[in-house]
Image (cartoon, helix red, strand yellow):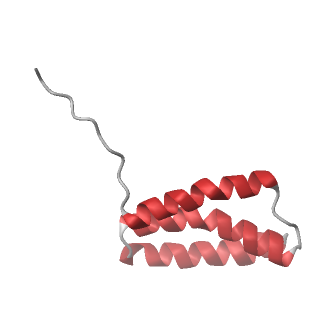
Amino acid sequence: MVSIGVLHTGIAYVLMNSAFPRLTTPVIGIITFIYPVVAIIIVDWAVYGHPLGPAQAAGMAPIAVATLGVRLGWRFPLRRVSAA
């Protein structure tokens, strides 16, 4: 458990927060989306040998879609209301 709290989280936050002043807002958003996925995959699966559960895998799908949307500049179509 020390590896999650001190090594992974501590180092990750130091690296991310030191990089934020040089990054754009969308890139910071992407990092915020991806961080929990990386933590689950690398630490939980690779270090501790716990496979992903269905709920974790289902939660990663919207994170991946949101990351792609931000990175590729997807926009929701807005309906224009006429002032008639």
Along the viewing direction, whichever of 40 and 56 lies nearer the viewer = 56
Looking at the picture, tell me which residue is in the foreground, 2 or 42. 42
Total numbered badges shown on the rendered structure: 0
Does 84 sit above or below residue 7? Answer: above
| On-image quarter of the N terminus | bottom right
Q: Work out whether residue 2 or residue 22 is closer to the camera in this orientation and state it.
A: 22
Q: Going by the image, does 4 lie left or right of 11?
A: right
Quarter of the rendering containing residue 6 = bottom right
Q: Residue at x 37, y 78 (%)?
A: 22
- Looking at the image, residue 60 lies above or below residue 80: below
Residue 47: % across, % down? 84, 77
The location of residue 55, given as percent across then percent down, is 77, 51
> Seen in the image, is 68 located left or right of residue 75?
right
What residue is rendered at 36% in x and 62% in y?
A: 73
56 up-or-down from 9: above or below:
above
Q: Position of residue 20 (x, y in %)?
A: 43, 72
The answer to which of 67 and 13 lies nearer the viewer is: 67
The residue at the point 42 percent across, 61 percent down is 70
- Above or below residue 33? Residue 22 is below
Kindly give the residue lying farthest to the right in the view shown. Answer: 49
User: Split into 4 quadrants, where in the image is the C terminus?
Assistant: top left
Residue at the image point whose x is 54% and y is 63% from the top? 32
Q: Based on the displayed image, in which of its 4 quarters is residue 21 positioned?
A: bottom left
Q: Position of residue 35 (x, y in %)?
A: 61, 67
Q: Residue furthest top?
A: 84
